[in-house]
Each structure stands twice: as C-alpha cells, then as structure tokens.
Amino acid sequence: MAVKRQDAWSSEDDMILAEVTLRHIRDGGTQLSAFEEVAEKLGRTPAACGFRWNSSVRKNYEAAIQVAKTERQRRSQDRSRYTTPLTLSSVRVDSVPVLENQEDEYSLDHVIRFLRQHKNEVGELKKQQKQLEQELFEREDELRRLEKENRTMKEQLTTVESDYQLVNDDYRTLVQIMERARRLATRTEELDKEHK
C-alpha cells in the first residue's frame, strides 16, 4: 500500500494511535511495532506516528500508560509463576533452534525501515524549513521597505506641517496688515470729513 501524506491529525487518529500503542505496551510489544500498525491503518509513516505519539498524544495518556505497564508486569509474573523453570540438565543444547539471528534480522529490518522513513520525514521537514526561511526573508524585506516608506512619509509630513505653519503665520500677518490698513483708511475718511 502506498503511504499517503496527511498533515492534519484528527482526534479519531489520535485515539487509534493511543489505543494501539497502549495495547502493545500492555501485551509486551514494542512501540515501534505499534507505530507500524497505526501507520498501516492511517496511511502514514511509522516515523510520523512515533513523532505524533511522543510530541502530543503521550502526555494525555500518562495514567493509561502506567496501567498498561502494570498489567504487563502482572501478566509477566503470572506466566513465570505457572511455567516450570528449565535447567541445563532438562534441555539438550543441540535440540534448541538458533533464532537469535532471525530476531536480529527482523529487528534490524524494522530499524532500517524506520530510519529510512525517518530520513524522508527529516528531508520533508528541511524542505519546509527552507520554505519558511525564504518566507521569513521576504517578510523581513517587506518590513524594511515599509519602515523606509514610513520614515519618508514622516519626513514629508514634518515638511508639510512646517510649510503650513509658515503659511499660517504669513496669513495672520497679512490679516493684521489689512486690519491696520482698514483702520487707517477709516481714520483718514473721518479726518477728511472733519476738515470739510
């Protein structure tokens, strides 16, 4: 099955991840095998499932994890209680099949697969990081441009305010001169009338 990438985790996805992981903890399985099972169900990579579990979901299930671990220990103790201990005299060494290499190969395959998927995830994250850095650079460039434009407009506003003040002062002076001229003209008319 081709693994499709999905960015958003739903609460249902989180619940499936938690249920499967807790079952594996309780049954004595590994978290890696839990992540692989969830990845198959949800169409994600085991690395993505592991990241989601460790970064977000796990903290919501701390109590359940402790219960699962306790259950695993209890089952382990029950099994050891009911199995008869083996002694060297009861088992012929040449009759025991060697499974260590198979287990090592199986776990090594899992590790290699996990690392490859993790490498893909890291590559994707690096790509996203570059895009975000480029976007940040563009935003910073835009911010610098706007700050420069803002400074220019402030300088222009200061110049306009200064010019306005000068024009206003000149206007007041002109009004005062015209008022004095009007008074002087009125006074002159009055004087002319008196002489007549």
Image (cartoon, rainbow, N blue to C red):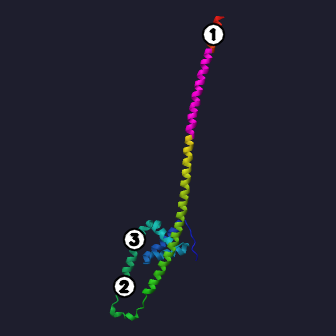
The residue stretch that appears in magenta: 156-184
Quarter of the image where one finds residue 6: bottom right
Q: Dot 1 lies on which element?
A: helix
Q: Dot 2 lies on which element?
A: helix
Residue 30 or residue 128, whichever sits in front: 128
Could you tell which of marks 1 and 3 lies nearer the N-terminus? 3
Label disc, if present, on residue 82 of the rendered structure: 2
Which quadrant is home to the N terminus? bottom right
Kindly identify the residue that appears in the image at 56 percent across and 53 percent down: 142
Kindly identify the residue that appears in the image at 55 percent across and 55 percent down: 139
Query: As shown in the figure, which amino acid type bears the numbered disc 3?
Result: Gln
Main SS, magenta residues: helix
Q: Dot 3 lies on which element?
A: helix
In the rendered structure, are the residues bearing label 1 and label 3 in contact, judged by CB atoms less than 8 Å apart? no
Could you tell which of marks 2 and 1 lies nearer the N-terminus? 2
Give the residue pinned by disc 3.
Answer: 66
Could you tell which of marks 3 and 2 lies nearer the N-terminus? 3
- The Cα–Cα distance between marks 3 and 2, rounded to whole angstroms, is 25 Å
Kindly identify the residue that appears in the image at 59 percent across and 30 percent down: 167
- The Cα–Cα distance between marks 2 and 1, rounded to whole angstroms, is 135 Å
Kindly identify the residue that appears in the image at 55 percent across and 59 percent down: 135
Residue 186, magenta (yes or no): no
Q: Is residue 175 visible?
A: yes
Looking at this view, name the residue that lies furthest to the top: 196
Residue 91 appears left or right of 18: left
Q: Is residue 16 visible?
A: no
Q: Residues within 10 Å of mark 3 (few under 14, many from 20)?
A: some
Tell us which disc is closer to us: 1 or 3.
1
Q: Where does residue 179 sit, x and y in percent of width and height? A: 60, 19
Give the residue pinned by disc 1.
Answer: 190
